[in-house]
Amino acid sequence: MSDKSTAENMLDAAKAKVNEAADRAREAAHDVSHAVTGHVSDKAKALEDRAKAEVHNAEAHAEYNEGKREAQDGDGH
């Protein structure tokens, strides 16, 4: 992790959660499209979006944990 403040880490965690939510919404849309059309490409896109969502989730947790550590240090940096 870089040398970011608590607020910067928490902001990055929130951004990652927003990106995760967007990825999961796209995943759901591709799943619906696959169910309606049966196109394999839609299922592949859904799987790709799920993987991206998991990456963003991991990023969010890492940023949050780093921000929490910074806050507990007492200096916030």
Image: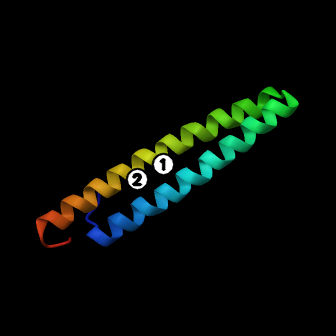
Apparent side of residue 32 relative to residue 9 in the rendered image (left or right):
right
At 20% across and 64% down in the image, what residue appears?
70
In the displayed structure, 16 sits above or below 11; it is: above
Q: Position of residue 57 (x, y in %)?
A: 45, 47
Q: Check contact, mark 1 vs mark 2: CB within 8 A.
A: yes
Give the colour scheme shown.
rainbow
Residue furthest right as drawn: 37
Q: Which amino acid type corresponds to the residue marked 2 in the rendered image?
A: Ala
Q: Position of residue 14 (x, y in %)?
A: 44, 62
Mark 1 residue crowding within 10 angstroms, few (<14) / some (14–19) / many (20+): many
Q: Secondary structure at mark 1?
A: helix
Residue 53 vs residue 32, the one in the foreground: 32
- Residue sitting at x 63%, y 33%: 47
Image quadrant containing the N terminus: bottom left
Q: Which residue lies at the image location 15% right of the left edge and 64% below the top edge?
A: 72
- Decide if residue 24 is on the left or right side of residue 62: right
Percent across and percent down for residue 39 are 83, 29
Q: Amino acid at mark 1?
A: His
Residue position marked by numbered label 2 in the rendering: 60
Please tell me in which quadrant of the rendered image residue 51 appears: top right
Q: Give residue 56's mark.
A: 1
Mark 1 and mark 2: span between their CA atoms? 6 Å
The correct choice, above or below, for 49 with respect to 8 in the image is above
Relative to 42, residue 74 above or below? below
User: Front-most of 52 and 72?
Assistant: 72
Question: Mark 2: few, some, or many residues within 10 Å (few <14, many ≥20)?
Answer: many
Whether residue 25 is situated above or below residue 5 in the rendered picture: above
Residue found 26% across the figure and 57% down from its top: 66
Residue 19: % across, % down: 55, 55
- For label 2, the SS is helix
